[in-house]
Image (tube, rainbow, N blue to C red):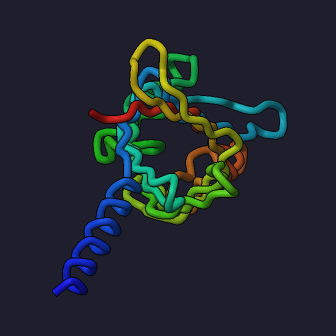
Amino acid sequence: MKFSHLMIAVLAAASAGSAMAATDTYNLDPTHTFPSFEADHMGMSVWRGKFNKTKGTVTLDRAAKTGSLDLVIDADSIDFGLDAMNTHAKKADMFNVEKFPAITYKSKSFKFNGDQLVEVDGELTLLGVTKPVKLNVSKFKCIMHPRYKREVCGADASAEFKRSDFGLNYGMPAFSPEVKLAIQVEAIKAD
């Protein structure tokens, strides 16, 4: 009889301990999250642009060193800083925003070095094509935000890929198929 009470107490303690190491959910802050990109133009200059509208969630279990990311980019929010280029980039021969209004990045594989997030392995979907793209994380920090009175985590991530792998072939070879991607991201802990 006493052994069964001891087992119940041990199981209860183990279950309480595992509940403490729960996964937290964070909502991306669209005013602090901007994926940007750059590609070489005929060896003369580098064209840069960004997307102005993103949404998504991050889950993070820092004790277990695991997490996930679900990022949705509004393709229609593309911004090169030149209205004529923005208009053309939305057409069928480039981002085809009418047929593919969203660009997504999904990951369930986070890599940590100690307490620092250093890498995210995920899949980018662009123009209906999904391919693996690894994000290298150069900065990662979580703080209690003085204005929001909640925890906010931020990161700076980068990647390189060939846009031609996704069928975005406009302007090649004048515009390089290699694209550098940079994402500044901040996410606010959900209630």
Query: In the displayed structure, does residue 113 sit left or right of residue 131?
Result: right
Query: In the displayed structure, does residue 29 sit left or right of residue 13?
Result: right
> In the picture, residue 154 is in which quadrant?
top right
Q: Residue at x 53, y 59 (%)?
A: 65
**Location of residue 115 in the rendering, given as x and y in whole percent from the top left corner:** 64, 51
The residue positioned farthest toward the left in the image shown: 1
The residue positioned farthest toward the right in the image shown: 44
Give the position of the N terminus as an image quadrant: bottom left
Total numbered circles: 0
Is residue 5 in view? yes
**Location of residue 36 in the rendering, given as x and y in whole percent from the top left corner:** 58, 34
Query: In the displayed structure, does residue 120 sit left or right of residue 3?
Result: right
The residue positioned farthest toward the top in the image shown: 147
Query: In the displayed structure, does residue 45 sit left or right of residue 181?
Result: right
> In the picture, residue 71 is in which quadrant?
top left
Q: Residue at x 27, y 33 (%)?
A: 191
Nearer-the-camera pick, 113 or 157? 113
**Location of residue 124 in the rendering, given as x and y in whole percent from the top left corner:** 47, 56
Nearer-the-camera pick, 11 or 190? 11
Is residue 105 in view? no
Nearer-the-camera pick, 9 or 111? 9
Relative to residue 160, is residue 1 depicted above or below? below
Q: Residue at x 71, y 43 (%)?
A: 138
**Location of residue 178 in the rendering, given as x and y in whole percent from the top left corner:** 69, 51
